[in-house]
């Protein structure tokens, strides 16, 4: 891509972007412990990083709050980690063995 930027009283500058994108690094983390709503830990931060990598909207803060809860619920629904009644009852407030297994399978 070429970009042309006008500069005040200096003419124009053309920037060429011919650099290939960097390859995505491996995730290098496996989930082994259950996580729950309102938890704060480095493991929650890894959960958030994994969800972000998979395209879910959350932030890597280390706190399992409402934004992460909604991302977890959407991930669980999209990947059918349990029946819809159980997912509805938990509302994304719990990452247990089935969700961890799906995360590990998709990220590693």
Image (cartoon, rainbow, N blue to C red):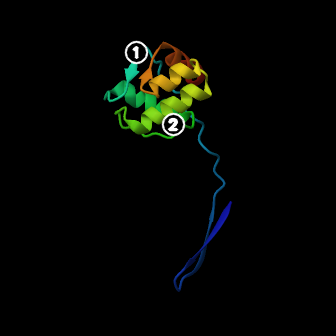
Who comes first in sequence, dot 2 or dot 1? Answer: 1
Q: Nearer the viewer, residue 33 or 6?
A: 33
Label 2 and label 1: CA atoms lie apart by 19 Å
Please say whether residue 26 is visible from this viewpoint.
no
Which type of secondary structure does the marked residue at label 2 adopt? helix
Q: Is residue 72 above or below residue 83?
A: below
Q: Nearer the viewer, residue 64 or 89?
A: 89
Which residue shows up at 36% across the image and 28% down it?
Answer: 37
Which type of secondary structure does the marked residue at label 1 adopt? loop
- Quarter of image, res 47: top left
Q: Which label is found at residue 33?
A: 1
Q: Nearer the viewer, residue 36 or 85?
A: 85
Q: Residue furthest bottom?
A: 9
Look at mark 2 in the image and give the residue it sits on. 52
Q: The C terminus lies in which quarter of the figure?
A: top right
Label 1, residues with CA under 10 Å away: few <14, some 14-19, many ≥20: few
Which residue shows up at 61% across the image and 22% down it?
Answer: 80
- Quarter of image, res 65: top left
How far across and how far down the image is residue 95, in percent? 45, 21
């Amino acid at each position: 891509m070429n970009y042309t930027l006008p500069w005040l009283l200096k003419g124009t500058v053309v920037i060429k972007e011919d650099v290939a994108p960097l390859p995505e690094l491996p995730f290098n983390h496996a989930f082994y412990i259950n996580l729950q709503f309102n938890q704060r830990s480095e493991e929650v931060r890894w959960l958030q990083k994994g969800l972000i990598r998979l395209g879910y909207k959350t932030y890597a803060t280390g706190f399992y709050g409402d934004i992460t809860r909604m991302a977890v619920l959407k991930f669980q629904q999209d990947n059918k980690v349990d029946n819809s009644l159980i997912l509805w009852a938990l509302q994304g407030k719990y990452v247990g063995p089935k969700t961890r297994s799906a995360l590990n399978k998709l990220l590693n």
